[in-house]
Amino acid sequence: MKRAIVIVIDSMGIGAMDDCREFNDVPECNTLKNVCEFNGGLNVPNLSKMGLGNIQDFKGIAKCENPIAKYGTMLEKSKGKDTTTGHWEMMGLVSEKPFATFPNGFQEEIVQKFIEQTKCGGILANRPASGTAIIEELNEEHHKTSFPIVYTSADSVFQIAVDTDFIPLETLYEWCETARKILDDYNVSRVIARPYKIIDGKPARISKDRRDYSMVPSHTVMNELEDAGLKVYGIGKIEDIFSKSGVTHAVHTGSNKEGLELTLDAVKNHIDKSFIFTNLVDTDMLYGHRNDAKGYGKAIEEIDTYLDDIMNAMTDEDLLVITADHGCDPTVEGTDHTREKVPVLIYSKTNKGEDLGTIIGFDYIAKIIKDYLQ
């Protein structure tokens, strides 16, 4: 049985798009290149032999004379630089109209609907902010008022943070579901539950309990696979990004390590899963948004350590694609996503390496998957 495996290294962009200034980014953005420079090079032998270093000059990622994978650069067609836009385009859905953003916070009409329908009493913040900074700043007031901390970023997101030792996790999820229904009318990409707890005297976000509530996409290649009777297995936040649409089986993860181990297990043991779709979010959530270039580099190196086992576990009927959904350069000013090109590596045991050059559209992946599986 043929299977396709797609692994998204969240935010591992490889250079600013020509229109980056329209998205308030600078041409110097290049997440992978700048992370490599910051760390004096990365130890990623498997990505190197797949041809990652052949795409452009990345310090410490050697060029390979005979790469085992096809390699290239993809340019995004959609107007965005966020997780939802990137993943949707990979599955064949190009977003011509950008999602709404809120650089001055959410308008009063949205806030009042949220307060009235959730009966939360009020909200705190209502402005663009770094998640780790805003919960530290407003934790005490959150405890005094019981109001949720609501904030956004440069992306189209409505984020709700609460201390789940103070407000139950189930209540946070209910508030997010209410917000999702309200925000469908305002073209908002995602509502994100941001639970945290006080650990060692400081607020700390609980990654495993995060949930994303995306708009429901129109028909994607995942729906086509499901309609054809194939199994689609989402690992990490894939189920959330697509609002369960086209996902037949799913499991959330608390870390890249867990996602990689689940992916390896699926390749080894789940022959019935025709499409295995994994998002590895730590590069973005823990390191890109926190300007931690050192941690970002270590996360890429950790991913690389699993690739050899994943490739060895593949059968001759399997196809592996490794890519990214946008950038989040931790070395430039700001903590938001960056509008970047992304790498694409395509491996199977029966194909030879090839330079694919520059590819217009992340939906190239949807075409590959559809052609291969159907």
Image: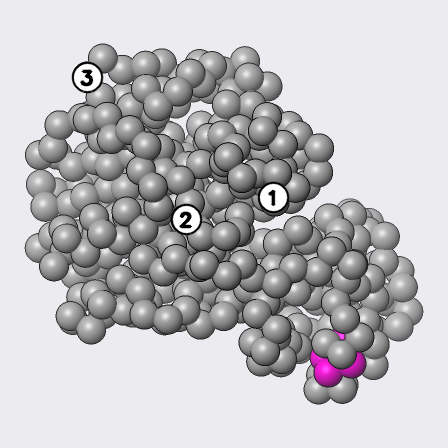
- Amino acid carrying mark 1 in the image: Glu
Q: Position of residue 304 (x, y in %)?
A: 37, 30
**Badge 1: few (under 14), some or many (20 or more) residues near its Cα, within 10 Å?**
few
Classify the position of the N terminus by image quarter: bottom left
Looking at the image, is mark 1 or mark 3 earlier in the sequence?
1
The residue sitting at 54% across, 13% down in the picture is 40
The residue sitting at 53% across, 28% down in the picture is 30
The overriding secondary structure of the stretch rendered in magenta is helix
Choose top left, top right, bottom left or bottom right for residue 52: top left
Q: Secondary structure at mark 1?
A: helix
Residue 364 appearing in the image: yes
Is 114 within the magenta?
yes
Q: Which mark is residue 77?
A: 2
Most foreground residue, 329 or 358:
358
Tag 1 and tag 3, C-beta contact below 8 Å: no
Classify the position of the C terminus by image quarter: bottom left
- The residue tagged 1 is 22
- As displayed, is residue 229 above or below residue 99? below
- Amino acid carrying mark 3 in the image: Asn
Q: Position of residue 344 (x, y in %)?
A: 33, 36
Q: Secondary structure at mark 3?
A: loop
Gap in Å between the C-alphas at discs 2 and 1? 14 Å
Q: Position of residue 319 (x, y in %)?
A: 18, 44
Q: Single out the mark in the foreground, 1 or 3.
A: 1
